[in-house]
Image: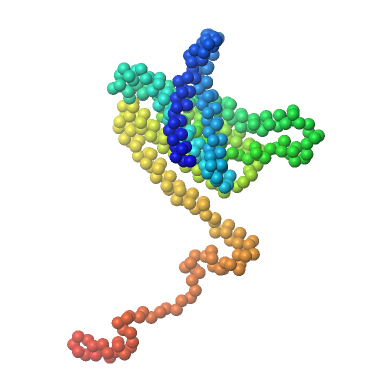
Amino acid sequence: ANTLLAVGAILWSIPVASIQALATVDTLASVTGMDWIQTLHGGRVASFVNGYLPVVLLLVIIMVLPHIFYAVALYYEDRKTQSDVQRSVIGRYFYYQLANIFITVTAGSILESLNEIVEHPTNILAILGKTLPNVVGYFVAFVMTKMLCGLPIVLLRLPPLMRTVFKKVVFREKYLTQSELDELQYPIKFRQLWYGWEYPNLLLVITICFVYSCISPVILPVGSAFFGLAWLIYKNQILTVFDPGYESGGLMFPMACHRTLIGLICGQLTLAGYSIIRGGFYQALVIFPLPIITIKMLGVFKTLYIDPGECISVERAVELDAHNPMAASSFDADVYRQPVLAETIVEPQMRQDSALSSLSDFNSLELVDGTKIV
């Protein structure tokens, strides 16, 4: 499954590049009967379509991915727990979105300046240095669309809302049982927070900010506004709306932190690469240690926080054993003490030498000058 999904991530450039090339007003105007869109309202509609149509189409494709990863984890890999399924979706969804970011950069920049690169291949770095900042406008529109459309949908909880409205219109409540009414008002499927959907969406935005802030810092205020609004909405949903059906023991949070640092590494590498493109070779040398330090910190955080977090604390273990009647008969009283503190009193032992097996042998030893030991 991982091999097939890796191949899919490589081929992910095909639909993304197709959207970049085809989702334009010129393409729509080439369809019979759609040429009017170029001149509608003095061309303002054409500018709006060019700015938002690729974003909307890309969001639609991205929304399909977690359903595919969920089906692969649940039905093909046969993962046994919901938390394991969600962890699988988070990892795969994040890396597909990461591929989407960099494929969009290369595809959009190269397609936009392809003719100029062909005419002047020796100036490819200078050409890309001028065209890369233009891609930032696409991602600013992307983040704004997620902020103004995606977050309100999270707040409205559109799927359960549409489901509830449909059932109330089609079915009469007096003919439904109490369990059916409860499921109608508060469906179990939509009570819990789907980590595999929500975490990668937030990680995508912060990775976009990391990667493109060095190219065009204008994306930082937009990203800050997104996370400010997301904090308010998700806080309300988690505290008052979502009712988790399972406990994962905090397994999702280390994954989120780990992938946030991976996004930071991508931003640092992008900064170094963009410095080289713009002719700042010495600046790139100064920046080069940053990704190495961040990779080192990944191991440090794993040692200090993730590995200890996977083990139950001693205090919690003692509490659990205190409520378990079988623990008193199967565990020693010193099971949670340090071994050195649990040792019993030991009498000192005489050192025995194989060459001096007995006192008689010892007395029979002679010195070099022939005298005996007394």
Q: Position of residue 67 (x, y in %)?
A: 56, 35
Furthest-right residue in this view: 174
- Tell me where residue 355 sits by quadrant: bottom left
- The residue lying toward the viewer, choosing from 367 and 263, is 263
Image position of 197 with respect to 249: above or below: above
Please count the marks in the image.
0
Q: Is residue 175 visible?
A: yes
Q: Nearer the viewer, residue 202 or 97?
A: 97
Residue 336 position, x and y percent, is 53, 64
x, y (%) of residue 314?
54, 59
Residue 237's spot in the image, x, y percent? 63, 37
Q: Is residue 368 left or right of residue 354?
A: left
* Left or right: where 5 falls relative to 183: left
Residue drawn at x 78%, y 36% as measured from the top left: 176
Residue appearing at x 61%, y 29% in the figure: 152
Res 292 → quadrant: top left
Give the vertical position of 208 relative to 317 (above or below): above
Query: Residue visible at 63% across and 43% down?
Result: 244
Colouring of the image: rainbow
Q: Is residue 217 visible?
A: no
